[in-house]
Amino acid sequence: MSQTIALIDAESFYASCEVAFDPKLRDRPIVVLSNNDGCVVAANVAAKQLDREIMFKPFFQVKAWAETMGVAVRSSNYELYGAVSARIANRRVL
């Protein structure tokens, strides 16, 4: 019996999960904030194109920028990310 191993690189995983559960976010720049909305911990490609140095900036410093640029801001949802990650990890490839 052979075993198949897959390596999955989910770019901007937290932001991708947010889009999967809220399709209105598709094609929008998105940032996800840390616990207590302290700083940016994830950003999709569109958000990174607007600001290459967005990652880990404190939210109070980027709040006005996000509103002006139409960036969707989401609080982190670690239960969601864990559930999606578990589903990906447990998926069997035939």
Image: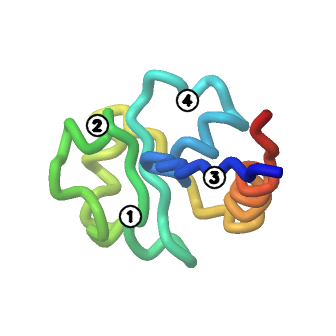
Count residues near mark 1 (Cα–Cα under 10 Å), then give few for <14, some for 14-19, many for 20+: many
- Mark 1 vs 2, N-terminal side: 1
First-in-chain label (2 vs 3): 3
Q: Vertical placement of 75 versus 39: above or below?
A: above
Q: CA distance from mark 3 to mark 1?
A: 32 Å
**Residue at the (62%, 44%) spot, across then down:** 18
Residue under numbered circle 2? 68
Say few, some or many: other residues with alpha carbon within 10 Å of mark 4 (under 14 / 14 to 19 / 20 or more).
Answer: some
Q: CA distance from mark 4 to mark 1?
A: 17 Å
Q: Depth check: 51 or 89 in front?
A: 89
Q: Is residue 53 left or right of residue 60?
A: left
Which structural element holds mark 2?
Answer: helix
Label 1: element kind: strand
Q: Amino acid at mark 3?
A: Ile
- In terms of sequence position, does the residue under pointer 3 or pointer 1 come before the other? 3
**Residue at the disc numbered 3:** 5
How far, Cα to Cα, is label 1 from label 2? 17 Å
C-alpha span from label 4 to label 3: 32 Å
Q: Amino acid at mark 2?
A: Thr
Provide the secondary structure element on which disc 3 rests: loop
Query: What residue would you read off at disc 1?
Result: 40
Residues 42 and 4: in front is 4
| Labels 4 and 3 touching (C-beta < 8 A) | no
Estimate the x, y position of residue 5 in percent, counting from the top left.
Answer: 63, 52
Q: Earlier in the sequence, mark 4 or mark 1?
A: 4
Specify whether residue 80 is in view: no
